[in-house]
Image (cartoon, rainbow, N blue to C red):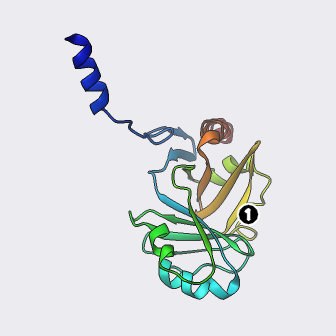
Amino acid sequence: MAKAAAKTTAAGSSAERRPALAGRTTEAKGVTLAVLAPAERISVRAPEASLTALSKALGVSLPTKPKTSAAKAGRTALWLGPDEWLVIDEAGKDPLADCAKVTALHSAVGISHRNVAFSVTGPAAAVTVNSGCPQDLSLDAFPVGAASRTILGKAEIVLLRTAVDAFRVECWRSFSDYVFTLLSEAASDAAN
């Protein structure tokens, strides 16, 4: 009888996907590092001729200049290459479904569960990120709204400057512990 009850319980249960590193934070003098809430993300590839239709469907203009981003109503589009964008939706909407309505030539792939995002904020945010990232993060070279695919230590990241003293760091889920730990150590060093 106990075996039958165990089988029934096991058959009725389901797997729960938990966000990587959910709830982890690090605070040091001048910088706070936090794991951001899950968001919807898509990788978009498209020729220039398709940008107007895609921008209209997504509700945000896909930027066309290197190191730029555009944001509107909880959705951000980051330029990653001449025909490539990362679209992040933090408003609970589905950008992949929005792209599915577009008949213009494009490719849109859902990558929501592949990525994890961190915020790095405070007066020492740029120093913290620069501890492992070779990108020039001076405001002249990397102003608010600047976005870039770059590296942090040995991991590829996408970096977005969200404010004068704030960054969003996107990385693959499999590298998230490494990236968070590297940023945590850098935050501690920046505080000294």
Identify the residue at image location x=67%, y=88%: 49
Please name whichever residue, 49 or 74, is drawn nearer the observer in this view of the structure.
Answer: 49
Q: Residue 101 location in percent, x, y?
A: 47, 79
Q: Residues within 10 Å of mark 1 (few under 14, many from 20)?
A: few
Please name whichever residue, 157 or 31, is drawn nearer the observer in this view of the structure.
Answer: 157
Please name whichever residue, 191 or 115, is drawn nearer the observer in this view of the structure.
Answer: 115
| Badge 1 amino acid | Ser
Q: Residue 106 location in percent, x, y?
A: 62, 76
Identify the residue at image location x=66%, y=69%: 146
Using the rendered view, name the quadrant where residue 79 is placed: bottom right
| Residue 163 shows in this picture | no
Instruction: Give the residue furthest to the left.
Output: 1
Using the rendered view, name the quadrant where residue 10 is placed: top left
Quarter of the image containing the N terminus? top left
Q: Is residue 118 above or below residue 55?
A: above
The reply, left or right, for residue 147 in relation to residue 113 is right
- Disc 1 marks which residue? 138
Question: How many numbered badges does the structure rendering display?
Answer: 1
Q: Is residue 71 above or below residue 147?
A: below
| Residue 140 shows in this picture | yes
Identify the residue at image location x=27%, y=18%: 6
For the residue labelled by badge 1, is the local secondary structure a helix, a strand or a loop?
loop
The reply, left or right, for residue 121 in relation to residue 37 is right
The reply, left or right, for residue 161 in relation to residue 101 is right
Q: Residue 179 location in percent, x, y?
A: 65, 41
Quarter of the image containing the C terminus? top right
Please name whichever residue, 31 or 80, is drawn nearer the observer in this view of the structure.
Answer: 80
The reply, left or right, for residue 148 in relation to residue 28 is right
Q: Residue 107 location in percent, x, y?
A: 62, 71
Q: Is residue 153 above or below residue 62?
A: above
Identify the residue at image location x=29%, y=21%: 7
